Image: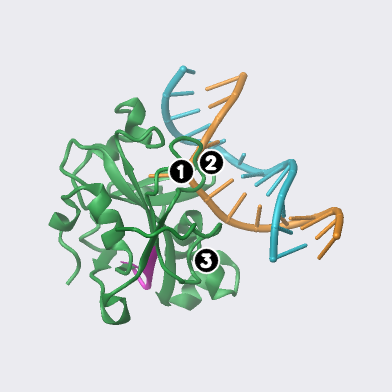
Chain colours: A green, B cyan, C orange
Amino acid sequence: MGLPASFYDRSVHEVAPDLVGCTLRVGPTAGVIVETEAYDVNDPACHAYVGRTPRNEGLFGAPGRAYVYLSYGIHSLLNAVAEPEGDAAAVLIRALEPIEGVEVMRERRGIEKVEDLCSGPGKLTQALDVGLDLNGADLTHPPFEIEPRAGDWRSVDLVAGPRIGITKAVDLPWRHSAAGNRFVSRPRPEVQPWS
DNA sequence: GCCAGGATCGTCT
DNA sequence: GACGATCCTGGCG
């Protein structure tokens, strides 16, 4: 059974670390989430900071939906919308450890190295075939499925670090990574105890 | 291995 | 008209 919509109906700062170690499945491909970033409406780096626009409409939507947008005109980035409807907040999925459909990912990415298949927000959307057409889609229904932590991921050590690729509020330690995991995106997080 | 720079286009000013 | 929640390549050591 996948995570219910109520899982996302909390503070984005609880949802973001809790998503690390969960399994994200899209069609025939799946991976364990090893890195996330939290964005909320009081955050200058958040798209919704400037107010509600047609582009960021999805950020204000119901929890448990996908917010997909185009970055740098090239890359689709996947977010999980959190907090009650009307509150703009989302968790950016930054990196996965591939576990299913690796050959399909290799074909889509055009590379062989498993470590490079999903080690970045723009890479994993290509590997999982997540495009703008899935903006607003329900993460609790196919083709999406997000499963709770299981097996060795039951207890995962987290490190929090500054966020990446943004120019505002970069010092907020809202990036959550699985400690020591080699599939996290680069540059690597600065090791800071998160409590 | 590390760093600098280009690609590329939707969105907002 | 400028700028990104990025990725990839090429140059250099």
- Quick check: is A73 in the magenta stretch? no
Asked whether A28 or A32 is in front, the reply is A32
> What amino acid is labelled 2 in the image?
Gly
Q: Secondary structure at mark 2?
A: loop
Q: Which residues are magenta?
A: A25-34
Prevalent SS, magenta region = strand
- The label shown at residue A73 is 2
Q: Position of residue A166 (x, y in %)?
A: 49, 41
Q: Earlier in the sequence, mark 2 or mark 3?
A: 2
Local packing at callout 2 (Cα closer than 10 Å; few below 14, some 14-19, many 20+) is: few
CB contact under 8 Å: marks 1 and 2: yes
Q: Secondary structure at mark 3?
A: helix
**Position above or below: A56 against A97:** above
The C terminus of chain A sits in image quarter = bottom left
**Dot 1 corresponds to which residue?**
A70
Question: Dot 3 falls on which chain?
Answer: A
**Dot 3 corresponds to which residue?**
A108
